[in-house]
Amino acid sequence: MRDPRDVPGFLAPVRHALTAPLLMGGAPRSYAILNGTLAAIIAFAGLAVPGIILGIAGHLLGVVLARRDPDAVEVLKRAMRIPNRLES
């Protein structure tokens, strides 16, 4: 059997930026924006300390999820749209 690297044109260089997930501070981009927006709403509503704590805790949760699986938030979003079919 031939090695695929021996066939000309079989391999194509792909930049790492095209395959890596978009992260902001280690958390998925969409999750980080949503978390920051919710934390800012709470903080500007008069609860500054709980808003900051909630923002930091939410971001740390996003970072942990992204370290385990970079697409974890996308999978959770899709799972929320699928109805439960196994319930009796």
Image (cartoon, helix red, strand yellow):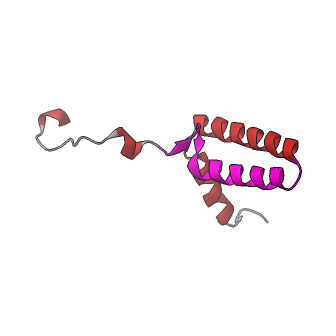
Residue 15's quadrant in the figure? top left
Location of residue 82 with respect to 34 vertically, above or below: below
Image label count: 0
Residue 1 in sight from this viewpoint: no
Residue 87 in sight from this viewpoint: yes
Q: Is residue 45 located in the magenta-colored stretch of the structure?
A: yes
Q: Could you say where residue 68 lies in the image, as x and y percent from the top left?
A: 60, 35
Image point (63%, 52%), residue name: 33
Image point (70%, 49%), residue name: 36
If the image is split into quadrants, where does the N terminus sit? Answer: top left
Location of residue 30 with respect to 57 vertically, above or below: below
Q: Could you say where residue 55 lies in the image, as x and y percent from the top left?
A: 75, 43
The magenta span reads: 21-47
Work out whether residue 50 or residue 66 is closer to the camera in this orientation and state it.
50
Q: Is residue 22 located in the magenta-colored stretch of the structure?
A: yes
* Relative horizontal placement of residue 9, taking residue 75 as reference (left or right): left
Image point (74%, 43%), residue name: 58
If the image is split into quadrants, where does the C terminus sit? Answer: bottom right
Q: Could you say where residue 27 lies in the image, as x and y percent from the top left?
A: 61, 41
Image point (80%, 42%), residue name: 52
